[in-house]
């Protein structure tokens, strides 16, 4: 049985994702596709537009066979930490043959050779070049890209290190190399709009970002009908969509509670002294989650980094806990979100070969796990609770607005009849 894995967010699942899964089966004769998917919060420091169970169902209806949740500490981590968490989970399942991902390069030999030489082992020359740009005030992604371009100045390499899917793919390869994993990386040329694209184009695969933006603006799924599979469209018609600003009030409350000094936020995951000072200094100007993140953005603090930091505060995620997971080899369990009848065939093999617990009932696991594993699962549960609460509050607000509109229309109708 040939097993191929995909690491994804599916935020939401769209036609580009469907193409990816179709090509995996067509090109590699894959029997089972295993997906490791971010839960209710994703790597750019925002909530998923719909919850993890809905997105799991979307994936299973369109080609995935099993879906495991990427723990929140990795889902809300930097590209490196995201990749290390996901790859460690897949490697520990003990059954995966291939890790398949999309990239701008579409050339696994080039990506692998470059990663092995320049990133996985971090030569002294690379470290020196990286530190040079960090000291100049560049953000880490910009420093990394500039350092690699200095070491490998060819046009090909410059394009390689500046493309977001290439960067993430190289982090996957790096994690596989460092683990000496038997999983083989495979890539497919990414088609359609870039992941930061804001527009829907009828003749290409739309980015998830463009689909989300359209859904937020239209508050209905009609506009994206041609860009997602039919089953996803039907599901989106029934959903309430969450965005970062839906967490503005609770974030403000948590930050004001703990705003005694400039270093008060430094112990949270991936914040540190500099970002803590920036957040503290701007707190009196807080209006909303997204406006505050833009307000705090600087040359060496990217918008995504700040959003992740704010989510870490919101979800009470600490640097100490993140370090503990890293020291204990990242993912501590595989939480199963869903599977098809076909995927069920692989579960027995996973349970026989895995080196970590497979969780199907979190309530049972919370009584059985210990140490970093227990902390990680508790964080996942807490994140889901925060997400669900925000969703319920938004649904109540929207239902109240709808009721007021109905009452207004009824009153208007009565006045017109009277006149």
Image (spheres, rainbow, N blue to C red):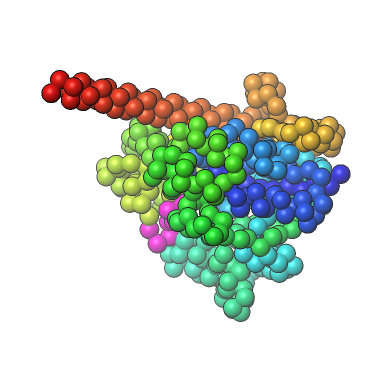
> Percent position (x, y) of residue 233?
54, 40
Find out whether residue 134 is within the magenta segment: no
Query: In the image, is residue 409 above or below residue 128?
Result: above
- 137 on left or right of 329: left
Say which quadrant the N terminus sits in: top right
Q: Nearer the viewer, residue 127 or 88?
A: 88
Q: How many marks?
A: 0
Instruction: Tell me the magenta residue range.
Output: 298-304
Residue 209 in view (yes/no): yes
Residue under the image location 60 percent in, 32 percent down: 53
Say which quadrant the C terminus sits in: top left
Quarter of the view holding residue 148:
bottom right
Residue under the image location 61 percent in, 69 percent down: 160
> Percent position (x, y) of residue 355?
79, 37
> Percent position (x, y) of residue 84?
66, 49
Query: In the image, is residue 157 above or below residue 296?
Result: below
Query: In the image, is residue 150 above or below residue 361?
Result: below
Q: Nearer the viewer, residue 94 or 48?
A: 48
> Percent position (x, y) of residue 94?
81, 42
Overall secondary structure of the magenta section: loop
Q: Nearer the viewer, residue 71 or 62?
A: 62
Quarter of the view holding residue 218:
top left
Residue under the image location 71 percent in, 59 percent down: 187
Residue under the image location 44 percent in, 26 percent down: 392
Residue 333 in view (yes/no): no
Find out whether residue 303 is within the magenta segment: yes
Q: Residue furthest bottom?
A: 154
């Amino acid at each position: 049985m040939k097993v191929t894995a995909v690491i994804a967010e599916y935020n939401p699942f769209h036609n580009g994702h469907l193409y990816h899964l179709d090509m995996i089966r067509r090109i590699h004769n894959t029997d089972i596709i295993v997906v490791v998917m971010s839960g209710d919060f994703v790597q750019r420091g925002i909530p998923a537009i719909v919850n993890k169970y809905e997105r799991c169902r979307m994936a299973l209806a369109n080609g995935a066979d099993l879906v495991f949740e990427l723990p929140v500490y990795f889902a809300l981590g930097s590209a490196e930490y995201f990749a290390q968490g996901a790859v460690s989970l897949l490697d520990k399942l003990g059954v995966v043959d291939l890790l398949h991902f999309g990239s701008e390069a579409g050339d696994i030999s080039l990506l692998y050779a470059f990663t092995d030489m320049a990133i996985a082992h971090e030569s002294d020359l690379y470290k020196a070049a990286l530190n040079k740009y960090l000291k100049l005030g560049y953000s880490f992604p910009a420093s990394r890209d500039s350092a690699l371009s200095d070491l490998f100045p060819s046009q090909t390499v410059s394009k390689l290190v500046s493309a977001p899917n290439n960067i993430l793919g190289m982090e996957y390869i790096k994690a596989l190399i460092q683990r000496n994993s038997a999983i083989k990386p495979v890539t497919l040329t990414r088609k359609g709009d870039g992941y930061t694209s804001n527009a829907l184009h009828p003749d290409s695969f739309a980015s998830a970002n463009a689909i989300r933006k359209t859904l937020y603006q239209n508050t209905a799924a009609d506009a994206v009908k041609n860009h997602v599979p039919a089953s996803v469209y039907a599901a989106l018609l029934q959903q309430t969509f969450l965005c970062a600003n839906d967490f503005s009030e609770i974030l403000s409350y948590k930050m004001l509670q703990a705003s005694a000094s400039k270093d008060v936020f430094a112990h949270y995951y991936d914040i540190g002294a500099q970002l803590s000072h920036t957040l503290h200094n701007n707190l009196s100007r807080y209006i909303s989650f997204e406006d505050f993140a833009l307000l705090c953005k600087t040359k060496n603090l990217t918008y995504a980094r700040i959003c992740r930091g704010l989510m870490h505060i919101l979800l009470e995620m600490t640097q100490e806990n993140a370090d503990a997971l890293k020291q204990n080899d990242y993912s501590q369990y595989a939480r199963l979100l869903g599977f098809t009848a076909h995927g069920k065939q692989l579960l027995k093999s996973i349970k026989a070969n895995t080196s970590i617990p497979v969780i199907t009932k979190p309530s049972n696991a919370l009584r059985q796990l210990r140490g970093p594993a227990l902390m990680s699962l508790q964080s996942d549960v807490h994140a889901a609770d925060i997400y669900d609460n925000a969703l319920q509050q938004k649904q109540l607000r929207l239902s109240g607005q709808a009721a007021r509109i109905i009452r207004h229309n009824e009153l208007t109708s009565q006045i017109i009849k009277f006149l």
